Amino acid sequence: MGNLKDDTSLAFSELRKESQDIYNRIHSIAEDSAFVDQVYQSYHRLPLIPNMRCGAWYTDPDIASDERAYFKSTDGHTGNWSFNLRRPNLHVLPLVCAHAGLLLVDSTRAGKRMPDALSKTVPIWCAVINRAVLKTTSNMNVDADAWNTKLYTPPGVVKVDGWADDLAASFYVLPKLQYPLRPIWITPSTTIFPKFPDTDVERRFYPIICISASKQVLDGMERRITGFAYIQGSGDDHELWSMGLTPAQFWKHKQTLLNANRNELPTLVQALTSSPNTPSARTDSNGSFHPTPIHHVHDHSRILYLQTPQGKKGQHHFLHSVLPQAIPFILLHLQNMRRVCIACETGTDTVSAFFDDSGEFCGKFEYEREGVLSKDDIKTRLHWIITSCPQANPSRTTLKRVNEFLLSPPEFLLSPPKCFSLLARQPHLMNTTQP
């Protein structure tokens, strides 16, 4: 009995090792990306964008749009369906209008034909936007009777009541849509790609074509005669297998990586990721720029360097140390007509300045009376940020700490200023420059 358990444990260990093998992963991604390219060739007039993060592994930068989408699978999980105003993805709507549709790429691991982001989150997004457009028809020439607001999903039902009201009442400005959005799904098991009208005369909707890149295979793994094991959804959770390799590096050195044998590949990846000429993951994933190295900055009175520990300890430090130091520093330099750069590890948490409800800078430091600010005020500022910087995606915990800082009474911590800001979680460097 003991030997059977040991053999089973060893077998599972080998399967896990094989599923995280970088050789298997990149060859699986290459196979799936060929399918994505096949779909793109059938709809080449439509822009191709990856759904971050996984979708970036399957979209060739040479043919993909510079835009990125941020549809999270968790917004489509059963019991957690929602339209998240922190991830409205309104920045892709101008692309949809300009090209009469969109190709959206993502993938999923074993057990599903397509990710929840494509099967549930995107359909909710389409239906909510269509209904929100109707609620703002005074600003748009929309035929309400002909406007399709149905929720289209694969088998399964979600509800969208109320989310359209939240979007219509938010700070976000919806672009003028000539037609409603409608999700369409394509997977490797799709036998015939649907056709869509090329002219406005016949068009009835803008197709949001959701491409699930990976094949659904038994147990998520399937052996290939070319010498690798195909792993469904290989681009997912790349921290577990990529050895620091990023999607941009994969596509830049694709043939070199695919031509390397299994034993050579780890050394090659290590060389690529450690090269000083190789762009960092931050630049690859969201276009962030590198701040000036601190030793090149001569006026250190304009630099505030803050470090925040990881985990729960870091959140306490962010609330009680980072924010109380950062806010006066930022305000001081804004009052002196300087711009403030906040550099953090990912660039996905948010940055905003000291502005009132009308967007005007508040030049005087005043402490706010308890009860004047509200969560809605803070939420509005967040909508401003996401409108101008779609990749901003502060965590729920970071927003909670910001709310605590701005809304707590003086006896809990330092009172917030009347005009307030949302700051990056785990900021590394604040640097100011003349306008």
Image: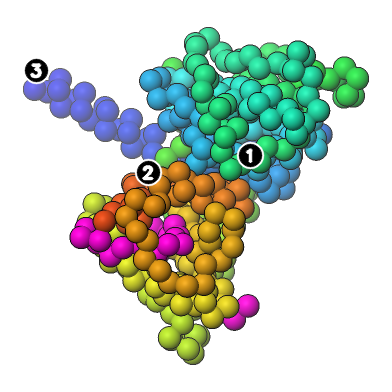
From the viewer's perspective, is 344 left or right of 174?
A: left
Disc 1 + disc 3, Cβ < 8 Å: no
Residue that protrudes farthest toward the left in the picture: 2
**Up-down: is 154 above or below 224?**
above
> Which is nearer the N-term, disc 2 or disc 1?
1
Magenta-colored span: 410-435
Let me know if residue 363 appears in the view: yes
Mark 1, residue position = 90
Which residue is drawn at the image coordinates 50% and 12% (left, top)?
Answer: 157
- Looking at the rendered structure, the kind of residue marked 1 is Leu
- What colour scheme has been applied to the protein in the rendered image? rainbow
**Mark sitting on residue 396:** 2
Q: Which of the two residues, 269 or 140, is positioned nearer the viewer here?
A: 140
Task: Describe the element under mark 1 as helix, strand or loop.
Answer: helix
Mark 3, residue position = 1
Residue 141: give x, y in percent of width and height. Answer: 81, 28
Residue 411 inside the magenta-drawn segment:
yes
> Which is nearer the N-term, disc 3 or disc 2?
3
- Looking at the rendered structure, the kind of residue marked 2 is Arg
**Up-down: is 356 above or below 98?**
below
**Mark sitting on residue 390:** none
Task: Describe the element under mark 2 as helix, strand or loop.
Answer: helix
